Amino acid sequence: MKSLLEIENIEKKYLTDSQKEVVAIKDLSLSIPKNKLSILLGETGCGKTSLLNIIAGLDSDFKGNIISNYGNLNIAFVFQHYTLFPWRNVINNIAFSLEIAGVKKSKRLKEAAELAKKVGLQGFEKNYPHELSGGMRQRVAIAQSLAKKPDLLLLDEPFGALDNITRTALQNMLIDVMQTEDITIIMITHNIEEGILLGDKIFILKSRPSKIIANYAVSMEYPRDKKSEDFVQIFKKISQALSTRVTDFMMRPF
Ligand SMILES: Nc1ncnc2c1ncn2[C@@H]1O[C@H](COP(=O)(O)OP(=O)(O)OP(=O)(O)O)[C@@H](O)[C@H]1O
Ligand SMILES: [Mg+2]
């Protein structure tokens, strides 16, 4: 199957308030496989959000090319600091994009209720965001983005702020979404374990300027066993890649 996106030679510069130029991304190329979950993994400040903004079309001030092999894509984005509409309850938050698209009320409420169930929010449909836990709010944000029936879902550290139990539940929810929807996902994390639990493909980014220094294809079945030999091996490789200086790493075969 053809890749969904070819991302070629991206260069992104920022100008700080004091007019200093920051090269956030340079010579970054990668290919996003269709109907798979790709992970972008790298330390803080290495340009992950900048890259996602570019892929989403939210930032057009960059050099390089983003080529879709499947025409115009319907893209949904769950932001690192996501926000829900505080005055809308769970169902009406989830149904937001359907409402904007002019979908009839009965139909959009039905679809939103199905999505609420899919992400494990049954019983909380009428709650308002301030009546939900952080994990529940994150579920709403994901259901809200799924309501758009996106070809491509971009997730910027969606589970970063959650406790381990909630995090595991949401990771499983995402695996379920991956397996039941016709969807491609790109997800940012700086948690190696999470990357291996979820990713079909893991891209390792190194900072300043950001580039891809390695990528791994993970073919283990879901749910993945953290204690399995394959898991431990790939964990070691990624930890090594992340802790090695770019120049050293590139000279070393692996
Ligand atoms: N608007 C901006 N103006 C100037 N510099 C910026 C701006 N946005 C990002 N940068 C710089 O670009 C680099 C990449 O930032 P980015 O937010 O993409 O990193 P990140 O990998 O998402 O980090 P984190 O894991 O902390 O979210 C950083 O060095 C950051 O300081
Ligand atoms: Mg970020």
Image: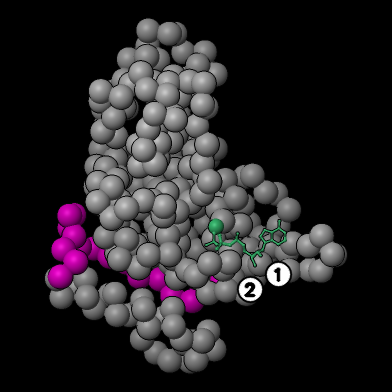
Residue type of the residue flagged with mark 1? Val
Left or right: 220 in relation to 187: left
Q: Is residue 87 above or below residue 27?
A: above
Location of residue 108 in the rendering, given as x and y in whole percent from the top left corner: 40, 15
Ligand 2 - quadrant of the structure image: bottom right
Location of residue 230 in the rendering, given as x and y in whole percent from the top left corner: 19, 73
Residue at the disc numbered 1? 23
Q: Is residue 52 above or below residue 241?
A: above
Q: Residues within 10 Å of mark 1 (few under 14, many from 20)?
A: some
Residue at the disc numbered 2? 209
Colouring scheme, one of rainbow, by chain, secondary structure, one colour: one colour
- Residue 220 part of the magenta segment: yes
- Residue 185 part of the magenta segment: no
Q: Is residue 223 above or below residue 192?
A: above
Residue type of the residue flagged with mark 2? Pro
User: Which residue is drawn at the image coordinates 63% and 63% (left, top)?
Assistant: 10
Q: Residues within 10 Å of mark 2 (few under 14, many from 20)?
A: some
Location of residue 73 in the rendering, given as x and y in whole percent from the top left corner: 51, 38
Q: Evaluate if marks 1 and 2 touch, with contact meaning CB atoms under 8 Å apart.
A: yes
Can residue 75 be seen here? The reply is no
Can residue 208 be seen here? The reply is yes
Q: Which mark is residue 145?
A: none
User: Which residue is drawn at the image coordinates 37% and 65% (left, top)?
Assistant: 191
Please report whichever mark, 1 or 2, sits nearer to the chain's N-terminal start.
1
Q: Which residues are magenta?
A: 211-227
Q: Is residue 163 above or below residue 177?
A: below
- Could you give the CA–CA distance between mark 1 and mark 2, rounded to whole angstroms? 6 Å
Q: Residue furthest right?
A: 19
Q: Nearer the viewer, residue 237 or 85?
A: 85
Secondary structure of residue under mark 1: strand
